Image (tube, coloured by chain):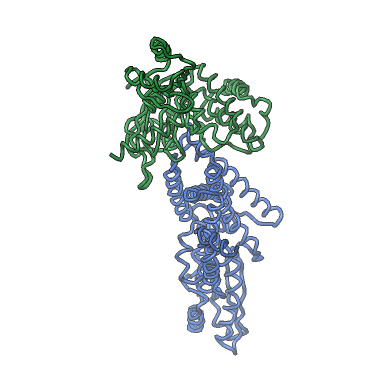
Chain colours: A green, B blue
Amino acid sequence: MTGNIVQTSGLTKQFGTLVAVDHVDLSVRGGEIFGFLGPNGAGKTTTVRILCGLMAPTSGGAFVVGHDVVREPEEVKQRIGYMPQSYGLYDDLTVEENLDFFGSVYRVPPNERRKRAQDILQLVRLDEFRKQFAGQLSGGMKRRLSLAVSLVHNPELLILDEPTAGIDPPLRRIFWEYFRKLNRLGVTFFINTHYMDEAELCDRLALINYGRIVAVGTPVELKRKAIGGERIELLTGDLSKTQAILKDSGFVREITVSDGGIQLIVDEAATAIPKLASFLRERGIEVIQVRQLQTSLEDVFINLIREAGEKSRL
Amino acid sequence: MTRKEVTHLIRNRRVFALTLFMPLLLMTIVGLAFTGEVKHITTVIVNKDGRPLSQVLVDALRASDVLRIRFYSEEEPQAEALIQNGLAKVAIVIPATFEDDVKLSGAVVYVMVDGSDPVSAGAVVPVVQEIALGFTSKLRVQVERLVLYNPSLRYIDFIAPAIVGIFLQIFPMILISMAIAGERERGTIEQLIATPLSGFEILLGKLFVYMAFGLLSATSMLIVAVYAFDLVVRGNVLLIGMFLAVFLTASLGLGTLVSAGSRTQMQAVQTIMPMIYIMIFLSGTFYPIEAMSPLVQPISYVLPLTYMIHALRAVIVKGAGLDLVTNDLLFLSGYTVIMILLAVVVFRKKLE
């Protein structure tokens, strides 16, 4: 066993002929915010349900917080928090009663439960609504309550299935503030999402499509991988001469010229930019502007999925 | 619009089956259960005379299809015991002086009936009277009715125990199946099974609540029957309580099974509805089972409600002790154990 908080090997789940999760190998390190990114129907929900011990895998296995999810699901459940995609709390109980019920179910002692409920409600800013019936809360507040419930027993790992799906951007940002705050307190996050802007905020990402892992890495690594490096835009006095010189320079991977300037792909933008500037100046070319171009994860995602598709067709 | 509605109806297979078969089922059951006349009433004959004339009367009684003469006895106490333990519903007593009386002024034949079943009790006397009249038109034979247990043959004494049984069969079953299907419908089941609670604990938590509720309701029903409608409870209250508890557990088990096959509360209720009709009409609630068509009698005898109602009537109205309802208790206990085991197996703590 490695020290990973989540470790799966060959995890597979079949529903009839549909292979929802196909030999997934994942490792999540303690303390990180791990994003599980993929389009709808890619197998994200099925994967986390298996990780939470709600569903048995068809084959393969997973260790979560050091326990086998198939053989010791209760051990796993006691130590992780789970926020399902669909809101699943009791509408006819108040905010406080919901928290208290789940606290009791996780066997949190009563006085600790009360104190913990207070802290969590403050964190998700629901303390004013503690006496309200959950059914009367707005959609966003229900989500916050859902997050609160997953925290009642002080879990070391939070597994969140699209926690911000259908939530407006300001509230999403607030959610991520909570995640960061909790993460600083030592909670590891496993977050399903199909929002690219959210994926950017994760420490590491796994891309999944049609049940298969397409790529794993930090957002920066994934971008590099997807386009074979980093992108730089260059504006000089003489574009065609620049292009000719750089072609044989050896440290540029790809060059394309457009009206606005020259786009380059290099291994690492941070080291390439100063080198590039001095290299061109030495050869008498005026460098007007040089800057790194941001790649959106969306492009990365589409690129990597296309690549994976081509590979699998071969 | 109409076509869309028809499509909805057909796609929803449970409702479709319900609309299609329910009317047929209901009418068939009612038709087979309520045959119109009470027949095959189990009878014991006490012929204390034994001379030819009394034999002729016995033969005439045997020829009737209303009576099914199962026993012959010498003494009334024996016959009464047969009625008390439910083996016979009626005893026809021919006095020792029957032949003499007939020739002199006119004889009296006593019909002892089981007051806990006023339907059979009411039906049997006119029949015996008719047979006695046809037996000889010249000689006078009078029929006198002796009612055991429920002397005024009140229908409430017959119905009240049955209603308690029906209530315990239906309501806890509906409540628990709706409670479980409701968790599934609202999506709370996912959050719930993500906790370290075992499936057995979740089920047990629910069972306890509805158990308490069921016992409370059944007790309040009996209290109302006793204080407002003068139901006389002749048997042991603890014995009644034992039956209530056992039967209630079985109902809850059955409700859990129903919920396992239902994704929504609506589906659970739709599944239960046809079951309820069969149970109510075939369990002998309103009409003695012996009088039903032989086609449906086997169903009656596998319905736990049949045994429950039999036992409740025996204990409440006839004051029967444990010895007389042992069979009912054994059947119900066995059924309960099976239901609960199935419920625990079926209520697994996984999503599918």
Question: In the image, residue B156 lies at what x, y percent?
Answer: 65, 61
| Residue toward you, A126 or B125 | A126
Question: In the image, residue A14 lies at what x, y percent?
Answer: 36, 42
Question: Is residue A276 something one can see in this rendering?
Answer: yes
Is residue A238 placed above or below A87 in the rendered structure?
above
Kindly give the residue lying farthest to the left in the view shown: A314
Kindly give the residue lying farthest to the right in the view shown: B228
The answer to which quarter of the image holds residue B116 is bottom right
Question: In the image, residue B99 lies at what x, y percent?
Answer: 54, 82
Please count the marks in the image: 0
Is residue B254 placed above or below A109 in the rendered structure?
below
Quadrant showing the C terminus of chain A = top left
Question: Is residue B246 something one can see in this rendering?
Answer: no
The answer to which quarter of the image holds residue A1 is top left
Q: Residue at x 64, y 66 (%)?
A: B153
Question: In the image, residue B98 lies at what x, y percent?
Answer: 55, 79
Q: Residue at x 63, y 22 (%)?
A: A122
Kindly give the residue lying farthest to the bottom in the view shown: B138
* B50 relative position to A175: left or right: left
| Residue toward you, A102 or B250 | A102
Is residue B146 placed above or below A24 in the rendered structure?
below
Is residue B159 placed above or below A121 in the rendered structure?
below
* A57 relative position to B316: left or right: left
| Residue toward you, A205 or B311 | A205
| Residue toward you, A293 or A15 | A293
